[in-house]
Amino acid sequence: FNIKDYSGTGSFIGWLRKVAVNTAITHYHKNLKYRYHVEIEDYVSVETGVMSFEEDYYTSDELYKVLNELPTGYRMVFNLYAIEGYKHKEIAEILGIDTNTSKSQYSRAKAVIRDKLEKLGKLKSNYPENG
């Protein structure tokens, strides 16, 4: 990737983010045989439309631990969809997987996250609505 590739249309930050994500994914694929541990960034507040992680209920350490314990494929799809805002079709192209695989890995990632948070006793549904 080269700065000369930026066409000047659209958001530079958006282009730069896409370059960073694609570079990280390329690096991941090149080093897949080594099965190293891939860390994700520490996100305190994540809005997925279905699950809501609110800082009132989850510490950054709890979220970081739960997200890092996801299987690599689940974690990558979850990160790209829920955090980076990519569509499943885009994720499928980036990762070289089928769109339905992206959707199922995202769904399974949410289920794993839900189970782990239940074990922590921290699911939002365990809290009263008004605080």
Image (cartoon, grey):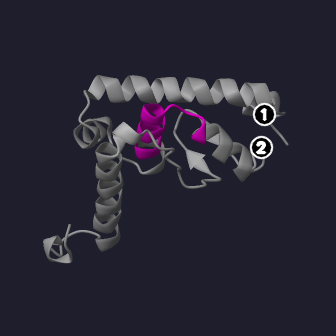
Residue of label 2: 57
Q: Please report whichever mark, 2 or 1, sits nearer to the chain's N-terminal start.
A: 2
Which numbered tag is attached to residue 66? none
* Percent x, y of residue 30: 29, 46
Identify the residue at horizontal 28%, vertical 39% (top origin): 95
Total count of labels = 2
| Residue type, mark 2 in image | Tyr
Secondary structure at numbered mark 2? loop
Whether tag 2 and tag 1 are in contact, CB under 8 A, the answer is: yes
Residue in the image at 40% along x and 22% along y = 104
Residue 42 percent across, percent down from the top left:
60, 55
Q: CA distance from mark 2 to mark 1?
A: 7 Å
Asked whether residue 124 is drawn in magenta, I would say no
Q: Secondary structure at mark 1?
A: loop
Determine the residue positioned at 32% across, 52% down: 27
Spot the residue most to the front.
34
Dominant secondary structure, magenta: helix
Q: Foreground residue, 111 or 56?
A: 111
Figure check: 96 above or below 56? above
Vertical arrangement, residue 42 with respect to residue 91, above or below: below
Counting other residues with Cα less than 10 Å from the Cα at mark 2, is it few (<14), some (14-19), or many (20 or more)? some
- Amino acid type of the residue that numbered disc 1 sits on in the rendered structure: Lys
Indicate yes or no whether the magenta region holds residue 79. Answer: yes
The foreground one among 72 and 91 is 72
**Pointer 1 residue:** 122
Report the side of 73 relative to 18 (left or right).
Answer: right
In the displayed structure, does residue 33 sit left or right of residue 6? right
Instruction: Give the magenta-colored segment's residue range.
Output: 68-80
Say above or below: 116 vs 67.
Answer: above
